[in-house]
Image (tube, grey):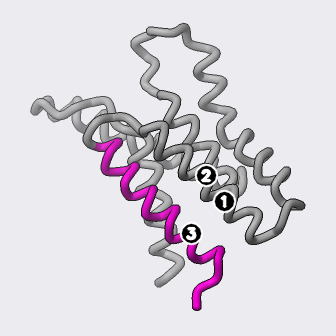
Amino acid sequence: MPSLVTLLDGLAAAVLTVLAITDLRSRKLPREWMFLLIALTLLRTMAAGGLAGLAIALASGAIAAGPIWALRLALPPGDPRWRLGGGDLRLAFALGIWLGALPALFILAVGSALAGLFGLAAASLGRGLDRSQPLGTWCIAVLAAGWLMTWL
């Protein structure tokens, strides 16, 4: 019988799959699904380490979300350079709770780089491809690739 942590990991993976598909289609990470993901990661933290690890997990989530929050503060609302939404901020927070600050920041960095490279490639091809890329989808893809590599 799988443990509670394994069950919560599986549920979070299912939610992440829904989020990736939704973000790819609509460029939005729905608030309801993001709060469900955050709740699952908090429950997983408590199931794995009790209340003792909860403060560390919340701090890790805040650290992981910090760069996106800083960008939100640096650019005025409505600035055309601003493409990150509240869903991206909540995704970074959830990844920080779930994985810790450093792995979450790594996923955000690699996901941002891949989104940027794909956007540049789409712009250079000029075939009507959308240059703006959904950060959430790329970050979830990086996370999935990491999971797959641990199974090899």
| Residue 34 located within the stretch drawn in magenta | no
Q: Residue furthest right?
A: 52
The amino acid type of the residue labelled 2 equals Leu
Q: Which callout, 2 or 3, points at the residue further toward the start of the chain? A: 3
Mark 2 and mark 3: Cα distance apart in space: 12 Å
Name the magenta segment's main secondary structure: helix
Secondary structure, mark 1, is helix
Which amino acid does the dot numbered 1 rest on? Leu
In what element is the residue under mark 3? helix
Residue with the mark numbered 2: 95
Q: Position of residue 33 (x, y in %)?
A: 47, 46
* Magenta segment: 1-24
Tell me whether circle 2 and circle 1 mark residues in contact (CB < 8 Å).
yes
Residue hosting label 3? 9
Q: Of the residues shown, which amino acid type is indicated by label 3?
A: Asp
Find the distance from the CA under tag 2 to the CA under tag 1: 6 Å
Instruction: Identify the residue shown where x is 48% and y is 41%.
Output: 32
Crowding at dot 1, Cα within 10 Å, few <14 / some 14-19 / many 20+, comes out as some
In the figure, residue 48 lies in which quadrant? Answer: bottom right
Q: Dot 2: within a 10 Å radius of its alpha carbon, few (fewer than 14), some, or many (20 or more) residues?
A: many
Q: Which residue is mark 1?
A: 99
